[in-house]
Image (cartoon, helix red, strand yellow):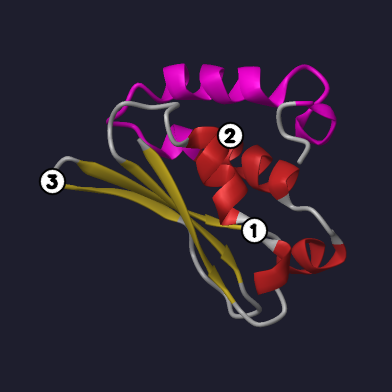
Amino acid sequence: MIQVTANLDLSSWPKIDTQHMNDLLRYMWDEPLYVIFYARKEPFKGRAWREKEASFLSIILPYEEVLKNDDNLGLMLDHLYQNVDKLKWLDHQALKRKLAALLGDEGAANTPAIQA
């Protein structure tokens, strides 16, 4: 189970759709994985950690790019794909393959499964 949340500010909040990400990713992985996207003006550091049986991955999105885009779903998927290697204790390569299949050959923006 993958659950996506976000830490946003008033400017980035309307630009990030965690519900759509949850709908796409929820059943992609059997183990509990919590992904937190940050899109704030303040600096944050991305990291990965494990607590009990759950894994956590915090991902920093490029703030100015988030504000420029109307739809950041592709950006979020791309950054998830780029950061999944930090989950060394999981079979992160298998998860990366599943994400690659979702992204498709032409990238997230052109993948019909991702277009809302």
Image quarter where the C terminus lies is top right
Query: Which residue has dot 3 on it?
Result: 52
Name the N-terminal-most of marks 3 and 2. 3
- Say what amino acid the circle numbered 3 marks: Lys
Label 2 packing within 10 angstroms: few (<14), some (14-19), many (20+) = some
Q: CA distance from mark 1 to mark 3?
A: 27 Å
In the image: residue 13, left or right of residue 64: left
Residue where numbered disc 1 is placed: 61
Is-magenta flag for residue 29?
A: no
The amino acid type of the residue labelled 1 equals Leu
Mark 2, residue position:
81
Quadrant that contains the N terminus: top left
Marks 1/2 in contact by CB < 8 Å: the verdict is no
Task: Identify the secondary structure beneath mark 1.
Answer: loop
Mark 2 belongs to which amino acid?
Tyr
Closer-to-camera residue (59/35)? 35
Looking at the image, residue 8 lies above or below residue 24: below
Indicate whether 57 appears above or below 65: above
- State the separation of the CA atoms marked 3 and 2: 24 Å
Which region of the structure is painted magenta? 84-112
Q: Main secondary structure of the magenta part?
A: helix
Instruction: Give the residue drawn at x 54%, y 17%.
Output: 97
x 49%, y 64%: residue: 45
- Residue drawn at x 86%, y 65% is 68
Image coordinates of residue 98 in percent, x first then y, are 53, 19
Pointer 1 local density, CA inside 10 Å: few below 14, some 14–19, many at least 20: some
Between the C-alphas of marks 1 and 2, the distance is 13 Å
